[in-house]
Image (spheres, rainbow, N blue to C red):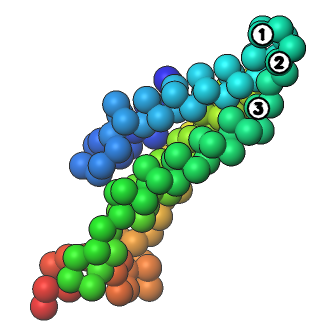
Amino acid sequence: MLCGSIVGLERQLRGKPAGIRTSTLICLGTSVFVHLGSSVEGAVAGQTGDPTRVLGQIVTGIGFLGAGVIMTRQEAVYGVTTAAVIWILASIGAAIGFGFHTGAIALSVVTVLILTGLEFLESRVRGFARGVYARREERKK
């Protein structure tokens, strides 16, 4: 929940879709599914767990969820970053479900650094603010 909140806070403060609640739930849900998939082995007589199958289904489901946030308006594509954030949130949740807690926290921090660092560069360095990355006010001219 902490990892999802770290990323979700950045998204919510910037007014982006998939804020704190969504991000936390994606991380939590993914970690629970992966943990359950890893824990099934021996829990049911004659059954063995295969966490890679569970993980494969999560990747498919998250891809579908991410695709749902991508839109096209006036020849511009919106929501790709949000879809990528949903994708990375699922990977953070999977890392937690497999027990890689330190890596999950590091990945959460790196994700926020990428989101905020590149936003900073886009606002300060002219070469980063071209095309669809140009400020809306500049595109209206």
Q: Is residue 6 above or below residue 15?
A: above
* Amino acid type at mark 2: Gln
Residue in the picture at 82% in, 18% down: 47
User: Which quadrant is the C terminus positioned in?
Assistant: bottom left
Determine which of the numbered discs, if any, sits on residue 47 in the image.
Answer: 2
Viewer-closest of 129 and 78: 78
Q: CA distance from mark 2 to mark 1?
A: 5 Å
The mark found on residue 67 in the picture is none
- Per the image, the residue denoted by label 1 is 44
Inspect the image, locate mark 1, and give the three-letter code of the amino acid beneath it. Answer: Val
Q: Is residue 74 above or below residue 35?
A: below
Which mark is nearer the camera, 3 or 2?
2
Q: Amino acid at mark 3?
A: Pro
Label 1: element kind: loop
Q: Is residue 141 left or right of residue 23?
A: left
> Label 3 belongs to which residue?
51
Lateral position of residue 42 relative to residue 105, left or right = right
Residue 113 appears left or right of 16? right
> Which secondary structure lies at badge 3?
helix
Rendered view: 72 above or below 97: below
Q: Quadrant of residue 32?
A: top right
Whether residue 87 appears in this view of the structure is no
Describe the element under mark 2 as helix, strand or loop: loop
The reply to whether dot 2 and dot 1 touch (C-beta < 8 Å) is yes
Task: Farthest residue to the left: give it.
Answer: 141
Q: Marks 3 and 2, how far apart in space?
A: 13 Å
